[in-house]
Amino acid sequence: MNLNHNAKLGLVTAIAIIGLFVLSLIITQMPEGDNSVRFGILTLLPPLVAIALAFITKETVLSLFVGVFVGEFMLCVTDLNIVSSAVNAFLGIGQQVISCMADPWNAGIILQCLLIGGVIQLITKMGGAQALANTFSKRANTPRKAQLITWFLGLCVFFDDYANSLIIGPIMRPVMDKLKVSREKLAFIVDATAAPIAGLAIISTWIGLEISLIASGFQSIGMTNVTGFGIFLQTIPYRFYNIFILIFIVISALTLYEFGPMKDAEKKARKRKTGEKVIEPSAPGFDEVKPVEGIKLSIWNAIIPIGTLIIGALIAFYWSGYTAILGGEDQALIHLMHTAPLSFNGIFEALAASDASVALFQAALLASIVAIVMAVAQKILTIEDAISEWIGGMKTIVITGVILLLAWSLGAVIGEVGTADYLVGVLKGAIPAFILPSLIFILGALISFATGTAYGTMSILMPLAIPLAWAVCPDMTFTIVCTSGVLTGAIFGDHCSPISDTTILSSMGSSCNHINHVQTQIYYALFVAAVAILIGYIPAGLGVPWFISIPIATVVLFFGLRIFGEKVDFDEVDSEETT
């Protein structure tokens, strides 16, 4: 057996060396120039390697590392000396990871994730999570209700997709486990109410980027009389994927129909014995954390820290933007802050100008302090134990930080080799006008899937899509539909991608094996995306209004789920638990 293992290792090593040599040989024959043109189809290699390895090995960290290495190797090749190129690529990985960690936005995201992990562990030790789960269990006494409550809570945490993933998953996981709903289904609901909601919300960490990109795009075609926020509002009815995935969750929860790997995961979950512990391999989480023995369970031990996090985040968003505007040079906005800081326009402009990563870190820090004070004041934990548990919660999130850093590094390397530019160049050829919204949606999805970032995809594609749409058909509604295609395509691709930070955090928050989450979710995402194209974007490109497409799509989603799916009944489980 050991010999067999060594033989496999040797074979993999030999294939890797041959692959690097062939890659070096091809690259050295390429002329110098823009990387997207120079590397051509090879620009797709780093993300494809990372994604393929993730599915084959189910090792996310290894897969991301190899993907980054391949990208760095491509950039370092100058001759056929693969040893020199490999050493330089390895050194490049170190520089890339440090560069990503030094980025203020990335650092803020990692810190707020760590702090939220600490808050969740404190809430669990104080019994708040258990009390909340017990409360929800009384109302969510059937799996249908549990899934719908999870969906509703996802709508409530609308302001940030990261916070959504890390709050909703740990709260609802005990409820779902008790009702024998799979971790994969929980992770899907959490993920599908994270970015899709944050991308639609008029108060969120996304909106500043979205409206700035929209405004710049319309300015590039000479339309300076429109506002980015005004166009943003007009795109909302055409965000077909976001809307349809939310409708699909409700239909699936009510009908109990599943298909693909999710059906198998749900059937497996049903076979668990009542009270049997759920074991998810390679799924770090808070499963082992239990409330302190003998304490009185109170939902306020969860509501107050989480409420502090949410309300504190909104206040921090406003204050961050308010101070940024007063420190800027836009006199109109400065005057607005002085005369009507709490008006709708004042609040909106402040939120749009905020630094979301800093604001969320501040809110998470405040929530951490509140949770520690509550634990000590109620004599549940000593100050030393409270801080120790808080740090323990952060340790649980460390692996997520590692994955995020590697995912960001892969995104940076992909940007350097020119993957997105290559895809845009290949797919933006002459096409019929009515198909352009669908093509933009698909292109956004491909870039987002390959790069693992919706933000980066929007930044890349929006400046190209708006002028292209206006050139193909100089009609405002048509251009708005195409703009929506960028925003929703980016979220769809991000939703499917195993290297997406939101997908990673949804797995983490739900304590679900990451690759299992990706494999079960992608079938549902593709089904909803197909409906979004066929019933949403193609008709919209032909001038069909959204209020016709959405009801028809709802019917198609319902019957499509009934045709492709199978009912995974809960009746027997419910009757068992009531006896």
Image (cartoon, helix red, strand yellow):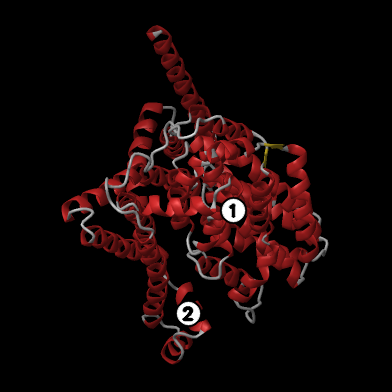
Please report whichever mark, 2 or 1, sits nearer to the chain's N-terminal start. 1
| Mark 2 Cα-neighbour bin, 10 Å: few <14, some 14–19, many ≥20 | many
Residue 63 lies in quadrant: top left
Q: Nearer the viewer, residue 435 or 492?
A: 492
Kindly state the secondary structure of the residue where label 2 is placed: helix
- Disc 2 residue type? Ile
From the viewer's perspective, is residue 568 above or below residue 193?
Answer: above
In x, y percent, where is residue 417?
A: 50, 44
In x, y percent, where is residue 83?
A: 37, 27
Circles 2 and 1: CB distance less than 8 Å? no
- Residue at which label 1 appears: 148
Mark 2 or 1, closer to the camera: 1
Kindly state the secondary structure of the residue where label 1 is placed: helix
The reply, left or right, for residue 107 in relation to residue 80 is: left
From the viewer's perspective, is residue 546 above or below residue 523?
Answer: below
- Which residue is outermost to the bottom? 339
- Residue at which label 2 appears: 347
Question: Which quadrant of the rendered structure holds the C terminus?
Answer: top right
